[in-house]
Image (cartoon, rainbow, N blue to C red):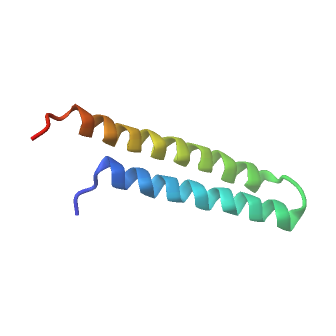
């Protein structure tokens, strides 16, 4: 299976959403912001940023190709 930037971007966005949900769940369980909550937020931020960048890259490549 060929991995396109769009597919990889969607996977990264899904992972970012999951890490965000894990951070929310961790905060609700502990009633405080612990080390793991900050770790989840940092990972979620990197995943969401990478995912959005890859999706934008996919559409940039798609728009730069000549129309058939």
Q: Position of residue 60 (x, y in %)?
A: 31, 34
Residue farthest front in this picture: 68
Q: Is residue 37 above or below residue 22?
A: above
Q: Residue at x 61, y 44 (%)?
A: 45
Tell me: 64 left or right of 57.
left
Q: The N terminus lies in which quarter of the figure?
A: bottom left
Q: Residue furthest bottom?
A: 29
- Point out the residue furthest to the left here: 68
Q: Residue at x 32, y 42 (%)?
A: 58
In the shown orientation, is residue 25 left or right of residue 16? right
Residue at figure coordinates x 87%, y 64% from the top left: 30
Q: Nearer the viewer, residue 36 or 5?
A: 5
Looking at the picture, how far across and down is residue 64, in whole percent?
A: 22, 31
Q: Residue at x 56, y 43 (%)?
A: 46
Q: Quadrant of the C terminus?
A: top left
Residue 65 occupies quadrant: top left
Give percent across and percent down for residue 18: 60, 62
In the displayed structure image, the side of residue 11 where residue 41 appears, left or right: right
Please tell me whether residue 5 is drawn above or below residue 17 in the rendered image. above
Total number of numbered labels? 0
Q: Is residue 36 left or right of residue 33?
A: left
């Amino acid at each position: 299976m060929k991995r396109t930037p769009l597919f990889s971007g969607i996977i990264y966005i899904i992972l970012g959403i999951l890490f965000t949900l894990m951070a929310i769940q961790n905060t609700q369980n502990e009633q405080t912001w612990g080390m793991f909550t900050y770790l989840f937020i940092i990972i979620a931020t990197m995943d969401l940023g990478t995912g959005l960048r890859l999706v934008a890259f996919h559409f940039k490549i798609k728009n730069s190709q000549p129309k058939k």
